[in-house]
Amino acid sequence: MAEHTYKFDVKMTCSGCSGAVDRVLKKTEGVSSYDISLEKQEVLVKGSIDYDSLLEKIKKTGKEVRSGETVE
């Protein structure tokens, strides 16, 4: 399966917020790498997982996902 890069605008106000997203992505099958920026409130994810599945995983943290897109 081809790898894609996704960018999400996630409302994160503290390191606990970004830590929750980190814990979920660490356990998610199909994610090969990711970068979480608390400052930009942005999550970049690379992997073979499909967009909708990834969006649901991030939403399960209870954080508001304001937008998301496939970057490549």
Image (spheres, grey):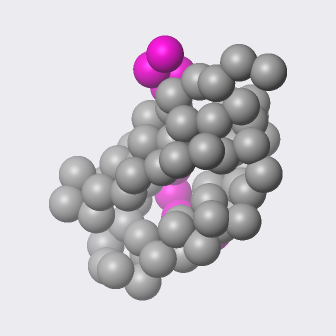
Q: Position of residue 19 (x, y in %)?
A: 47, 77
Residue at 51% over, 42% down:
45
Image point 23% across, 51% down: which residue?
40
Q: Inspect the magenta stretch and tell me whether residue 32 lies in it.
A: no
Residue at the outermost left position = 39
Give the position of the N terminus as an image quadrant: top right
* Whether residue 10 can be seen here: yes
Magenta stretch holds residue 66: yes
Q: Residue at x 54, y 66 (%)?
A: 21
Left or right side of 3 for 29: right
Closer to the camera in the image, 49 or 58 = 49
Q: Is residue 66 visible in this depiction of the protein?
A: no
Instruction: Please report the residue visible at 42 percent of the width from the left and 70 percent of the height from the top.
Output: 18
Q: Between residues 57 and 11, which one lies in front from this camera angle?
A: 57
Q: Which residues are magenta?
A: 61-72
Give coordinates of residue 63: x percent, y percent.
Answer: 53, 64
Residue 71 or 1: which is nearer the viewer?
A: 1
